[in-house]
Image (cartoon, helix red, strand yellow):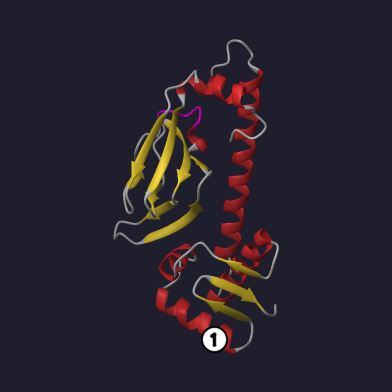
């Protein structure tokens, strides 16, 4: 979020807001669906997941957010809107929270503030692209199609056909909206057919 800003510019921006760093234990909720979101959040360390839960408690993972990731930016300028998703600490995590209120104010036409807002727009665009990628995965009609689409995206992001995925098998099943046992069986079939190789979270696409 602070890309392109020097130390003085970052200090200028942060001096205008109350900065709060909160620590969350694994499995803690940062926000629940239905909460009013009043802070722009940055993952300092750890892993946060954007999730959607149904009334039976079944969880779908929408996005996986590592250190440096920004979330809740879509509520900037919509302070009284309620979140439609939950944010969940997938590991012990620290989150930097910046109140929305002062972010939209720039009375002195600060160049640092203008740079920051441009970065936030870029983050919105990037996150929108990730949601489109997720939609492309879920639109596949078969579990194998979903797996292949996901692995192809991860390979493209890594720039190599051998890469590490950020999910456990359970979380990957939740991300793909699939049953864990069915996912495990399909991965084994794809390995037996010579399509992929994997060892724990390290995958390699052998043929497409």
Judge whether 6 appears above or below 125 on screen.
above
- Displayed quadrant of residue 163: bottom right
Residue depicted at x 64% and y 27%: 6
Q: Is residue 32 visible?
A: no
Residue depicted at x 53% and y 43%: 68
Residue depicted at x 37% and y 51%: 92
Residue depicted at x 61% and y 80%: 196
Magenta stretch, main secondary structure class: loop
Residue 18 coordinates in the image, percent (x, y): 42, 23
Judge whether 125 appears above or below 18 on screen.
below
Q: Is residue 12 visible?
A: yes
Judge whether 71 appears above or below 173 on screen.
above
Residue 206 coordinates in the image, percent (x, y): 67, 79
Q: Is residue 78 or residue 109 the one in the foreground?
A: 109
Which region is colored magenta? 76-80
Residue at the outermost bottom position: 192
Q: Is residue 72 or residue 42 the one in the foreground?
A: 42
Element at label 1:
helix
Residue at the outermost top position: 108
Residue where numbered disc 1 is placed: 189
Q: Is residue 130 left or right of residue 16?
A: right
Residue 152 coordinates in the image, percent (x, y): 65, 67
- Displayed quadrant of residue 148: bottom right
Residue 38 coordinates in the image, percent (x, y): 41, 30
Q: Please check the rendered image and state whether residue 17 is part of the magenta-colored stretch, yes or no.
A: no
Judge whether 74 appears above or below 93 on screen.
above
Q: Quadrant of the C terminus?
A: bottom right
For mark 1, does the 10 Å Cα neighbourhood hold few (<14), some (14 to 19), or many (20 or more) residues? some
């Amino acid at each position: 979020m602070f890309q392109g800003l020097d130390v003085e510019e970052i200090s200028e921006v942060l001096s205008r807001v109350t900065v709060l760093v909160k620590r969350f234990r694994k499995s803690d909720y940062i926000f629940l669906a239905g909460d009013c979101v009043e802070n722009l959040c940055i993952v300092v360390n750890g892993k946060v997941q954007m999730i959607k839960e149904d009334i039976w408690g079944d969880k779908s993972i929408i996005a996986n957010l590592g250190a440096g990731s920004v979330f809740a930016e879509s509520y900037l300028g919509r302070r009284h809107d309620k979140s439609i998703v939950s944010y969940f600490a997938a590991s012990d995590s620290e989150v930097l929270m910046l109140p929305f209120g002062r972010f939209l104010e720039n009375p002195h036409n600060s160049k640092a503030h203008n740079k920051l807002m441009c970065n936030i727009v870029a983050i919105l665009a990037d996150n929108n692209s990730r949601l489109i990628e997720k939609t492309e995965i879920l639109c596949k009609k078969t579990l194998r199609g979903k797996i292949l689409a996901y692995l192809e995206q991860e390979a493209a992001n890594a720039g190599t056909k051998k890469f590490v995925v950020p999910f456990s098998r359970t979380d990957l099943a939740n991300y793909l909206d699939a049953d864990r046992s069915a996912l495990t069986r399909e991965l084994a079939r794809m390995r037996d057919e010579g399509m992929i190789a994997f060892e724990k979270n390290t995958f390699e696409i052998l043929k497409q």
